[in-house]
Image (cartoon, rainbow, N blue to C red):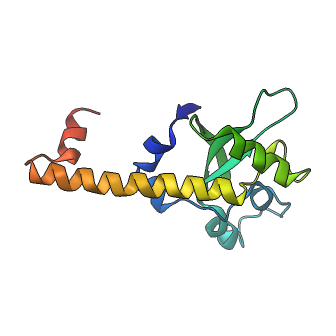
Amino acid sequence: MADISISKIGKTRAFRENLRFDVTPELLFKPRFANTSGNEEFIKETQGFSFYVEYMEGMDKPALMVMKTYRLTSKSIAQVTDAPEELLWGAVRESGARDIMGMYPLSKPLEDWIRSQIEAQAKKTQGDKKDAGHKGGNRDQIRQHHP
C-alpha cells in the first residue's frame, strides 16, 4: 500500500471521475447474498474510489485511507499522508461505535476538506495543461517517454 498526498491523488483525472463520497464502510460491508445474478445494482452502487478513516485501539492516530472497489472486490490502496489530524479524530469521535472493523465513515468537515483539496488540484492541473499547450509541450507525450 502506498503513501500519497491529497494533492497528488487529486491530479489523477480517473480518480476524480470515479470518486464516490456516497460509498461508506457500512454500505460496502453490509450483509448481502452474493450470487452470480442480481448483483448488477450493488456493483454500480459501490464501484470506484472512496475514502474512509482507519483507527483501531493501539494506533497512535487515525489515518485517511483510499479504497478501490471494482465488481465485488475492494482493496485499500493508499494512505493519505497530509490529512489534518484534528479532522481525522473528529470523524472517529463523530462515528462513535459505528465503525466497521476499524473503518470509520468521513465526517462532513473531513469530506469538505477532501473535496476542496481535490477541486483545487483539478483546477491547478487544468491550468498546467493549458500552460503546457501554450509552451508547445504535451504532457501526455512526455509521460509516455518518462513514466
Residue 46 placement, left or right of 90: left
In the image as oriented, which residue stretches furthest toward the front?
A: 86
Q: Position of residue 105 (x, y in %)?
A: 75, 54
**Image position of 59 with respect to 142: above or below:** above
In the image as oriented, which residue stretches furthest toward the left?
A: 136
Residue 49 visible to an observer of this rendering: no
Q: Position of residue 61 (x, y in %)?
A: 75, 32
Q: Position of residue 101 (x, y in %)?
A: 84, 43
When asked about the image quadrant of residue 79, the answer is top right
- Taking the spot 10% from the left edge, 53% from the top edge, the residue there is 134
Q: Nearer the viewer, residue 51 or 6?
A: 6
Residue 97 placement, left or right of 85: right
> Where does the N terminus fall, quadrant-wise?
top right
Q: Position of residue 98 (x, y in %)?
A: 88, 54
Residue 60 visible to an observer of this rendering: yes
- Taking the spot 51% from the left edge, 57% from the top edge, the residue there is 116
> Where does the C terminus fall, quadrant-wise?
top left
In the image as oriented, which residue stretches furthest toward the right?
A: 97
| Marker count (numbered) | 0
- Taking the spot 84% from the left edge, 53% from the top edge, the residue there is 95
Residue 100 placement, left or right of 8: right
- Taking the spot 85% from the left edge, 26% from the top edge, the residue there is 58
